[in-house]
Image: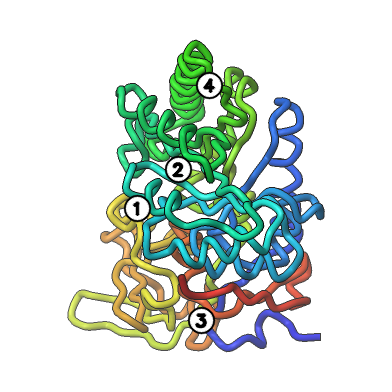
């Protein structure tokens, strides 16, 4: 059996038991709150993890790319949501998936996209299934939920003869600006209340809203009581978690399920500058989030070495220095070819860097290889 230390580095290692625990915890949280969990696939993009996320049912997943949707469709998944604003040039592929699957749902947040769907007739008189994306405060895609445009767009969806209004969706991405669990709950509460207000307004105008959910790992990991009034939750990063989630209060550091394994490749003393170089550059961990973490751990947290900081990175080189600039490194503590483990600041970005995930058990045996689907 292959051991972790046999791996060529840099390598992305995933602890299977932690992924399983994270998935089971989120499924239980959703069940306890009386909502349906429709989790996001975008973090790992690995079929094995999607099966865990759905509790083995292969029903109810979200994707951010069409190749992800293809992978799930080819492996028997149903009720898949393309959680990304559809644009007219993607309509043909979305039509193919809609005709192939029992339920393939697309996002709309503008009239131009809706008109493209209206003009494309699906086979066998099948209707497009459409969620209207609304912005509850994240400031990204989605029609502003308090604006008249939201109700107006929904009315246009309802009027389309070949489109079925499937409900409302909001990302709740502003939860990532929080600093603790209480702030996360407040964001979840406010987003939920905005969603429920719109649902009530639609009801007054004779429009039934079949589903209405919000989704982000922080808001679903630390849910406000009000979120039990929703029909669905849509988290994604929780399968692995990361330093960002620890920082804002979504999880504990022991919940992080992945790390980059790297080797020390050199010792350097240049004037007063003493440092290590490791074989983990930004192509192995990404640069995402460094502005939020560079004053503390740098580009990631070096596990079990609070004295170290991943201070700089180029494409294939990582420079490790003493976190305390007044205490130079004792290089003898980190022999050339010895291993370090780095928790990523943002695991979604780190996963995107790797063609294979090395799956380990609790004894650091490599028990599987997961291969994420790539492309758009």
Secondary element under disc 3, as helix, strand or loop, is loop
Q: Nearer the viewer, mark 3 or mark 4?
A: 4
Category of crowding for the residue at label 4, using alpha-carbon neighbours closer than 10 angstroms: few (below 14), some (14–19), many (at least 20): some
Q: Are marks 4 and 1 in contact (CB under 8 Å)?
A: no
Q: Which dot marks residue 247?
A: 2
Which residue does the image show at 51% across and 81% down from the upper left? 10
Residue that lies at the very extreme toward the top in this rendered image: 204
* In the foreground, 250 or 87: 87
Residue 226, relative to residue 174: is it above or below? above
Q: Nearer the viewer, mark 4 or mark 1?
A: 4
Which residue does the image show at 47% across and 47% down from the upper left? 107
One can see residue 305 in this view: no
Secondary element under disc 4, as helix, strand or loop, is loop
Residue 39 on image: x %, y %: 62, 47
User: What's the CA distance linking mark 1 and mark 3?
Assistant: 21 Å
Category of crowding for the residue at label 3, using alpha-carbon neighbours closer than 10 angstroms: few (below 14), some (14–19), many (at least 20): many
Q: Nearer the viewer, mark 4 or mark 2?
A: 4
User: What's the CA distance linking mark 3 and mark 4?
Assistant: 53 Å
Q: Which residue is mark 3?
A: 10
Residue that lies at the very extreme toward the left in this rendered image: 271
Which residue does the image show at 76% across and 56% down from the upper left? 58
């Amino acid at each position: 059996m292959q051991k972790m230390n046999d791996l060529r580095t840099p390598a992305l290692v995933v602890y299977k038991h932690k992924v399983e625990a994270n998935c089971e915890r989120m499924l239980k949280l959703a069940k306890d709150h009386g909502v349906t969990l429709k989790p996001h696939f975008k973090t790992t993009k690995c079929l094995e993890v999607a099966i865990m996320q759905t509790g083995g049912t292969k029903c109810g997943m979200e994707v951010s790319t069409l190749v992800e949707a293809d992978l799930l469709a080819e492996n028997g998944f149903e009720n898949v949501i393309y959680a990304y604003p559809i644009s007219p040039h993607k309509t043909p592929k979305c039509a193919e998936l809609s005709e192939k699957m029992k339920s393939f749902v697309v996002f709309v947040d503008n009239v131009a996209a809706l008109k493209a769907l209206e003009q494309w007739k699906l086979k066998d008189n099948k209707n497009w299934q459409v969620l209207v994306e609304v912005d509850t405060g994240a400031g990204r895609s989605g029609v502003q939920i308090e604006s008249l445009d939201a109700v107006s767009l929904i009315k246009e969806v309802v009027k389309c003869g070949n489109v079925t209004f499937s409900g409302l969706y909001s990302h709740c991405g502003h939860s990532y600006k929080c600093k603790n669990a209480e702030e996360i709950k407040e964001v979840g509460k406010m987003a939920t209340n905005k969603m429920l207000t719109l649902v009530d307004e639609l009801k007054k105008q004779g429009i039934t809203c079949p589903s209405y959910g919000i989704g982000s790992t922080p808001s679903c990991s630390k849910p406000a009581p009000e979120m039990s009034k929703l029909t669905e939750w849509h988290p994604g990063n929780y399968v692995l978690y990361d330093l960002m989630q620890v920082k804002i209060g979504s999880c504990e550091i022991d919940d992080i399920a992945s790390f980059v394994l790297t080797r020390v490749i050199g010792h350097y003393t240049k004037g007063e500058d003493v440092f290590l170089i490791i074989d983990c550059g930004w192509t192995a961990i990404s640069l995402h989030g460094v502005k939020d973490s560079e004053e503390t751990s740098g580009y990631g947290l070096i596990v079990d070495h609070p004295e170290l900081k991943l201070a700089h990175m180029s494409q294939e080189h990582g420079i490790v220095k003493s976190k305390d600039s007044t205490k130079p490194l004792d290089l003898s503590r980190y022999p050339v070819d010895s291993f370090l483990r780095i928790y990523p600041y943002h695991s979604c970005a780190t996963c995107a860097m790797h063609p294979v995930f090395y799956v380990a058990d609790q004894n650091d045996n490599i028990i599987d290889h997961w291969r994420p689907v790539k492309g758009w």
